[in-house]
């Protein structure tokens, strides 16, 4: 890389890190998600470059690499904060809500894209996969401030959102495997090959998941304890991050998105309580690189596509809201009553991390147009800004209390 390109990349990276911290502090001051600020920051950088043409191609490539590290940090964080045992325990109760949630939110998104916006089949399917996900972290601050996160409804919400994210990643992988079928829709052999490719994708996803389980079961604790004993907690953190990057890279080399590997790497370390406690130290890595993912999402928006994106985003934002209110909220009624069900549905409305990962992957493969991509970014901004305000209001109207009895979780829930 030429010296001047490297120098420019260092300057831009440093400025972006500083601005990201300021954006985060300013947005959190008003209890708003910083992700929206990062998106605007990236879009502002793109508009400035369009007018002044000051970014070298090497600098843009460097930003893409930082964004990929941001995806890895993001999905590793999602996996690390997950609790596979708790998910398995909740599955009998959550499976009906989860299936309805994914089916309805994806179905409403597909219908809006295909028949209201008249998009082609493949972009409509990617929109559906993106809208099946959620970003419950956007709503969590409101739940934490209300002391409701450890209520029955709060814990159920966390588990449901994790299942949502996992299924959205799986849908993305299956769609990418089935793409050849849509390029030659009249070719039966091509369709058959796509089905086989999807089956291979499921096999490898299962294999990666099983490998992560074996690693977590037999190796993870030994590795982390050994490095903690040799060089302390800092060395253990670096080793965990190293394993996360290796697994993410191997997933990328195997034909999957690196995000898939990062998610499973996080899951592999999530079973160890010590590793989860380490998450506070991992936040430095997370806070440093994650903003670049959202900045890259904003930077990838074509300014000329913003006009048409507003109309697409408006339609899809309504579909995103209706999909979660009906898909997640309605089936939760029997578990938590009308107030709790509405809270869960509203809390599931934001679309940020996983939804944008899906759309970024589709755009990189030239499977969605600039307008559709920008429209989904608008959906992310609208839902992330709207949902916390609504959730705070609903929590005041319908407080959720943590269980009043012992650690087994029984007692006065939501």
Image (cartoon, helix red, strand yellow):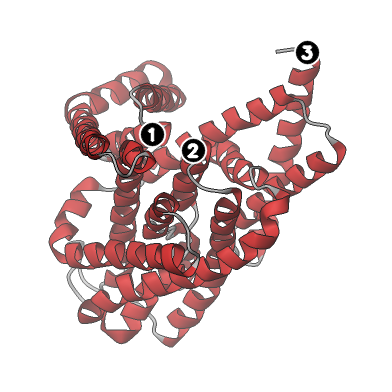
Packing grade of label 2 (10 A; few <14, some 14-19, many >=20) is many
Residue visible at 63% across and 43% down?
Answer: 300
- Locate residue 180: give its quadrant: top left
The residue labelled by disc 3 is: 3
Q: Earlier in the sequence, mark 1 or mark 2?
A: 2
Coordinates of residue 292 in the picture (x, y in percent):
61, 39
User: Which label is found at residue 262?
Assistant: 1
Identify the disc placed on residue 133. none
Q: Which residue is mark 2?
A: 71
* Residue in the picture at 19% in, 30% down: 207
Task: Please give left or right for residue 26 compared with residue 389 in the image.
Answer: right
Q: Secondary structure at mark 2?
A: helix
Tag 1 and tag 2, C-beta contact below 8 Å: yes
Query: Where is residue 33 drawn, in percent x and y?
Result: 58, 59
Q: Which of 414 and 36 lies nearest the eye of the viewer?
A: 36
Give the left or right position of residue 168, taking residue 368 as reference: left
Crowd class of label 3 (few under 14; some 14 to 19; many from 20; radius 10 Å): few
């Amino acid at each position: 890389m030429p010296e001047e390109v490297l120098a420019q990349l260092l300057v831009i990276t440093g400025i972006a890190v500083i601005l990201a911290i300021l954006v985060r502090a300013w947005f959190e001051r008003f209890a708003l998600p910083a992700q929206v600020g990062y998106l605007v920051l990236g879009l502002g950088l793109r508009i400035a470059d369009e007018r002044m043409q000051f970014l070298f191609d090497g600098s843009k490539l460097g930003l893409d690499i930082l964004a990929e590290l941001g995806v890895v940090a993001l999905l590793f964080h999602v996996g690390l904060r997950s609790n596979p045992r708790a998910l398995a325990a909740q599955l009998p109760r959550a499976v009906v809500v989860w299936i309805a949630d994914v089916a309805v939110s994806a179905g409403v998104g597909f219908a809006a894209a295909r028949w209201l916006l008249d998009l082609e089949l493949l972009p409509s399917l990617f929109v559906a996969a993106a809208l099946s996900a959620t970003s419950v972290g956007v709503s969590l601050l409101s739940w934490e401030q209300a002391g409701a996160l450890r209520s029955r409804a709060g814990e159920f919400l966390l588990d449901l959102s994790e299942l949502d994210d996992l299924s959205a990643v799986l849908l993305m992988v299956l769609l990418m495997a089935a793409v050849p079928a849509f390029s030659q829709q009249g070719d039966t052999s091509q369709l058959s090959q796509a089905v086989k490719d999807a089956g291979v994708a499921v096999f490898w996803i299962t294999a990666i998941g099983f490998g992560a389980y074996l690693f977590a079961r037999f190796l993870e604790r030994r590795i982390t304890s050994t490095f903690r004993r040799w060089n302390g907690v800092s060395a253990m953190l670096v080793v965990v991050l190293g394993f996360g990057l290796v697994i993410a890279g191997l997933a990328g080399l195997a034909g999957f998105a690196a995000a898939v590997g990062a998610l499973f790497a996080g899951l592999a370390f999530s079973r160890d309580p010590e590793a989860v406690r380490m998450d506070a130290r991992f936040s430095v890595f997370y806070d440093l690189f994650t903003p670049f993912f959202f900045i890259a999402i904003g930077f990838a928006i074509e300014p000329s596509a913003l006009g048409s994106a507003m109309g697409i985003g408006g339609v899809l934002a309504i579909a995103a809201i209706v999909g979660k209110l009906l898909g997640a909220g309605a089936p939760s009624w029997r578990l938590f009553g009308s107030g709790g069900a509405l809270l869960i549905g509203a809390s599931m409305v934001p679309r940020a991390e996983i939804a944008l990962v899906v759309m970024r992957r589709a755009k990189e493969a030239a499977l969605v147009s600039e307008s559709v991509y920008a429209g989904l970014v608008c959906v992310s901004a609208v839902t992330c800004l709207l949902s916390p305000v609504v959730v705070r209001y609903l929590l005041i109207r319908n407080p959720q209390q943590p269980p009043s009895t012992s650690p087994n979780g029984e007692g006065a829930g939501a």
